[in-house]
Amino acid sequence: MFSARLFLIPIPAVLALCGLACESAPPGQFRADITIGDLDKITTGRIRVHDSVYRLDLTEGGEHWFVVVDEKANISRTFSPEYKTYVEVPANDKRSYLVDPIQGQRYLHGIGEVRDYGVKNVAGYECSLYVVSINRQPMVTEYYSPELGFILKTENHISRDLFLRIDNIEQVTIPDSVFAIPSGYRPKGEAGEGPVEVPSWISDLTAVETTIPPFEMTVAAGELFRVAVEPGFGLDVRGRNVGDGNASFSAVPFLLDLPIKDVSIYTLNLPKRGTSGGWTFEETPLEAEEIVVRVNEGRINFTVQQIELGFGETVAAGEKYRQTVLPNRQIIVRMVNVDETESSCAVTLTRDGTPLEGDTVGPLSFRSVSLKTKHASERRTYTADADEIVIEVQKGRMLINVRQP
C-alpha cells in the first residue's frame, strides 16, 4: 500500500472528477490506467469514475487493494481483499491521503496557490498546464484535459521519482455495483467499536510514564512514549527523521490500555533525513485516555503540543446547538455520540436567519451525521457565506464542538 511519504512531499495526483465532454459517452463516466511513482517503488492500477464517486484498484509489490470514494457523502473506504475487511474514514480526513492520491491532491490544492501556465498537448489531448505552489515554492505541475475533465500527467518539483500518469482512457458506462461494498466484507477498526488488533509492543506500555506537553524529544527504534488526553484540548504530534536512513513511527489513541483505531492507519514513513509529518488528534477523554507514540524504525525527533479545541456542548434529541460563525471562513464541526445507542443530527448553515441552499454548503448526506455506537465520532468541515451554524440532534445525545481556526 502507499507509504505515507507520498503525502509528506506533496504528490502528483488526479484533480477534478468532472463530466466528460464527449457526446457519445455517458457524462461523468470513464475508466483509465494509473501509474504512480513513489521514490523507490511503482504502483499501478485502474480508476473507474461515475460523477462524484470513484474506485481505485491498485497493485504494488504483489499487494492488491482498492479504494472507493463518494465525495458528495464525504466517505472513503479502503478494502483489503486478502482479509475481506475495509476501513472507512471521511474522504477529506488526512488518513485518506495515505491510501488515495486523489484526496492527497485535493488537500494540496486547498493549501496551495494554483496558477495557469498555458496549454500543451499530452497523449493527443490539449491540456491546460497548472503549477501548484506553497509559500511561492512550486510543488507540482499538472496537465489537465478540459475535454476529459481529468489530469493526464503530473510532474513533482521535489523529486522526479514522484509522479502520476493517466493512460488508456475509455469513456464507457460504469455500473453502480462497481462502487458497492462487496458481499462478505466487514468493517475493520471503526471508531467507537472498541479495541482493534493489538500490536505486539503493547506490553511495553506499563514501564513508560505519561509525558506532559508541550515537549520535544528524540526517540530511537523500539522506544515509545505516552501523552495524556485532556478535556478541551487536542494533541498535535509531529516527527522529523534525524537518522541516516528510513524511519517510521505510529501514533495511536488508546483507551483502557488498548488501541481504539487500527495502528496501520496511523503509521507514517519518513524516507530520509529531514522529512517530517504527523497528526492532530481531537479525541475527547470519553474516546481516548492517551496517545501512544512508538518509533518502529530509525531515529525521530518529536514535537508534541496541545491545541485548544474548547469543551463543546452535550445536546439531546429534539434540541438545537447554535453558534455564530465568521462568513467564508472554515468551520470545523466534531460530533461524539455520548448515548448508549445510535445518535444522529442535521447541520444547517444560515445567513441573516435564512438557511443556505444545499448546493452552496454540500448535499444533505454531507450535512447529516449518524453515529451508531457510543463514543463514535465524526468530523465535518464547511466553508460558506454563513453567519450561524445550527445543529439539530434528531436521535440520542451528542457532544458537539464547533471551531474556526
Image (spheres, rainbow, N blue to C red):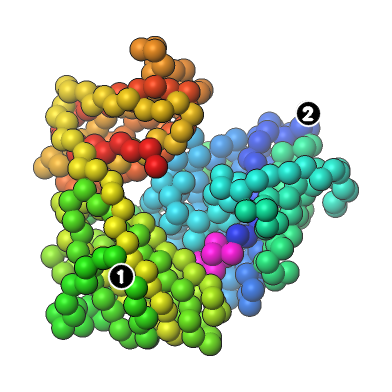
Q: Position of residue 186 (x, y in %)?
A: 33, 55
Task: Name which residue lies at 36% across and 64% down.
Answer: 237
Q: Neighbour class for label 1 at 10 Å: few (<14), some, many (≥20)?
A: few
Question: Is 381 located above or below residue 237 in the figure?
Answer: above
Q: Pick the residue in front: 173 or 260.
A: 260
Residue that mark 2 sits on? 23
Mark closer to the observer (2, 1)? 1
Asked if residue 303 is among those painted magenta in the image, a careful observer would answer no
Do residues under tags 2 and 1 come within 8 Å of each other at their CB atoms?
no
Q: Pick the residue in front: 394 or 379.
A: 379
* Marking on residue 215: 1
First in sequence: mark 2 or mark 1? 2
Q: Is residue 195 left or right of residue 69?
A: left
| SS assignment at label 2 | loop
Q: Is residue 267 left or right of residue 114?
A: left
Quadrant for the C terminus in the image = top left
Q: Position of residue 171 (x, y in %)?
A: 73, 41
Asked if one can make out residue 25 in the rendered structure from this viewpoint, the answer is: yes
Task: Name which residue lies at 81% across and 45% down.
Answer: 117
| SS assignment at label 1 | strand
Q: Is residue 307 left or right of residue 331?
A: left
Give the amino acid type for the residue marked by disc 1 in the picture: Phe
Asked if one can make out residue 337 in the rendered structure from this viewpoint, the answer is: no
Q: Which residues are magenta?
A: 1-9
